[in-house]
Amino acid sequence: MAAVARSLSTCIFCKIIKGEIPSFKLIETELSYSFLDIGPLSKGHALIIPKDHAAKLHELPDEYLADVMPIAKKIATAQGLENYNILQNNGRIAHQVVDHVHFHVIPKPDASDEEGLVIGWPAKSDVIDEVKKYHQELLGKL
């Protein structure tokens, strides 16, 4: 059983959860609420929001996180998606616009940049020694 969910009266997502702002609801559970995005990147773009108000992923209790992925799977399956992105951002410089943890299910209908998520992947090369060193450092913190 989850603890009492935190809520913020000024948060647009908390208002959607409470029904104070209308939405195109898809799936609602005790811990999560999902709906179609009204500014979609492609047809079927949906959002899944935990009912606990937390600004960033690491601030959200684990039971809310465990509830989200099965919902994302159901939304993707219901749409018959073969190509799609699951996106979750933390912080302004990581492109988070609403300070309430949320997950996007973004259909990618074709290989063009016309619909769906369009990203670059500026992978670094020749950094294996740095990766090896950081691996050891990170293991010590896990």
Image (tube, rainbow, N blue to C red):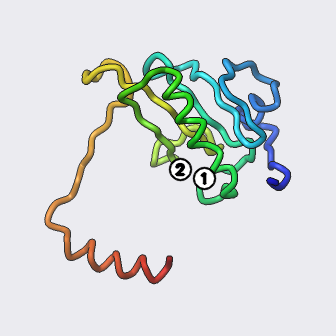
Q: Where 120 sits versus 82, above or below?
A: below
Q: Secondary structure at mark 1?
A: loop
- Crowdedness of circle 2 by 10 Å Cα count: few (<14), some, many (20+)? some
Q: Amino acid at mark 2?
A: Gly
Q: Answer left or right for 21 relative to 42.
A: right
**For the point 35% across and 81% down, which residue is it?**
136
Q: Answer left or right for 133 relative to 55.
A: left
Measuring from the top left, give residue 70's x and y in whole percent: 58, 40
Q: Where 138 sits versus 87, above or below?
A: below
Measuring from the top left, give residue 87's x and y in whole percent: 47, 40
Could you say which is closer to the camera, residue 91 or residue 88? 88
Residue 23 lies in what quarter of the image?
top right
Which residue is situated farthest in the right direction here?
4
Measuring from the top left, give residue 8's x and y in whole percent: 79, 43
**For the point 65% across and 30% down, which residue is it?**
34
Q: Answer left or right for 115 relative to 141.
A: left
The nearer-to-camera label among 2 and 1 is: 1
Q: Which residue is mark 2?
A: 91
Q: Which residue is mark 1?
A: 56
Asked if marks 2 and 1 touch (Cβ < 8 Å), the reply is yes
Q: Where is the N terminus found, in terms of image quarters?
A: bottom right
User: Mark number for residue 27?
Assistant: none
Could you say which is closer to the camera, residue 54 or residue 82? 82
**For the point 31% across and 18% down, which residue is it?**
114
The residues bearing labels 2 and 1 have C-alpha atoms spaced at a distance of: 7 Å
First-in-chain label (2 vs 1): 1
Q: Where 54 sits versus 37, above or below?
A: below
- Crowdedness of circle 1 by 10 Å Cα count: few (<14), some, many (20+)? some
Q: Amino acid at mark 1?
A: Lys
Measuring from the top left, give residue 95's x and y in whole percent: 47, 42
**For the point 69% across and 54% down, which residue is it?**
63
